[in-house]
Image (tube, rainbow, N blue to C red):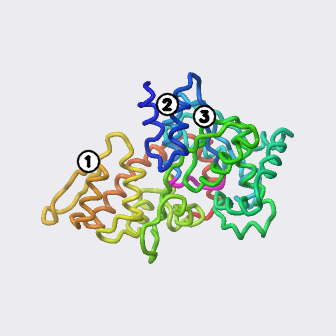
Amino acid sequence: MKIEEAEALVKRGLEEVITEDRLRTLLEEDRRLRGYIGVEPSGLFTLGWVIWARKVKDLIDLGVDFILLQATWHAWINDKLGGDLENIRLCAEYIEHCLQALGVSRGSYRVVYADELVSTGDYWSIVLRVAKSLTLKRVRRALTIMGRRAEEGVMDFSKLIYPCMQVSDIFYLDLDLCLGGMDQRRAHVLAIEVAKRLGRKKPVALHTPLLIGLAGLGRMEGAIKGEALYEFKMSKSKPETAIFIHDTEEEVEKKVLKAYCPPRMIENNPVLEICRLILFPEPGFRLKIERPLKYGGDLEIQNYAELEDLYFKGQLHPLDLKNAVARALNERLKPVRDYFKTVSEARELYDKMMSLTVTR
């Protein structure tokens, strides 16, 4: 594969690369790159996580030696699943099944548990060196990577260790590429900033966009993008505004029909965002609109730009859009439902996660 093709594959679907120049330099090196994503095992797999799962597959297809870091201790620090490490580890196994169901083969990447990292003195030596390189103010600003506000760090001192651990994960695993949502940007920037000081190589940060919750931004005015969307992203902590990859057809339809979707509004419209970030990136996808002839008849939309243009001009009613999106999502999620019905271990883990989290 040519350098230009490899670069296009890496950047496809990303919101940001820090930096593109260093990415190209890496791709020009004659060696296999090492990349990762750190995932907190914290509950059911949301539709928003499909974005990074697809990007994992892209990097694996490129030949990246890819690591899924099951951030078990990080989830424990973050009080996920009641702070029970055993349940967090079960959730980690469940996540691997989700990736398999989404087409990311379990044998195509390497799994590392945070338990392995924290059991070594070398790891904690890096954590302390990272901590000495950062001010308290800088660490507190990075707490948004945990889905927390900076002021929450005073409630539990362990929260302040979390950003230092995430930076240390990157150095300990000797990574070239760090994949994460825009909500992980601050941790990746910290790693880039302190790398030279600690004699480590600067990683290239690859950031996927965040999928906003079905409630949208409500009464807020203006567009909000990038890292600032973390407070509004689709989250398992707000199940009423989230779609989970296991939701039944009826649940998907109900949730989409209730979603915030004002006529002709493009920015931060959650239904359009599902089209832009989840549906249209699928190879060969076309959005099929079914409507009576008196309202324009059936329509097959070829790409997201065409959809956005039609919607902005008022040539597509929100209800017709919602019905089409619900049908398309259910078709996309059918293989996931089938997988969890037929693979007994996956089903047992899903049932366990359901018993631990409130999602209905």
Callouts 3 and 1 close, C-beta under 8 Å: no
Secondary element under disc 2, as helix, strand or loop, is helix
Q: Amino acid at mark 3?
A: Phe
Q: Residues within 10 Å of mark 2 (few under 14, many from 20)?
A: some
Q: Quadrant of the C terminus?
A: bottom right
Q: Position of residue 242 (x, y in %)?
A: 50, 62
For marks 3 and 1, the one nearer the N-term is: 3
Q: Amino acid at mark 2?
A: Asp
Q: Residues within 10 Å of mark 1 (few under 14, many from 20)?
A: some
Q: Which mark is residue 66?
A: 3
Q: Quadrant of the N terminus?
A: top left
Q: Is residue 208 above or below residue 21?
A: below
Q: Position of residue 179 (x, y in %)?
A: 57, 44
Q: Residues within 10 Å of mark 3 (few under 14, many from 20)?
A: many
Secondary element under disc 1, as helix, strand or loop, is loop
* Rendered residue at 72%/63% (across/down): 140
From which residue to which does the magenta span run? 41-48
Callouts 2 and 3 close, C-beta under 8 Å: no
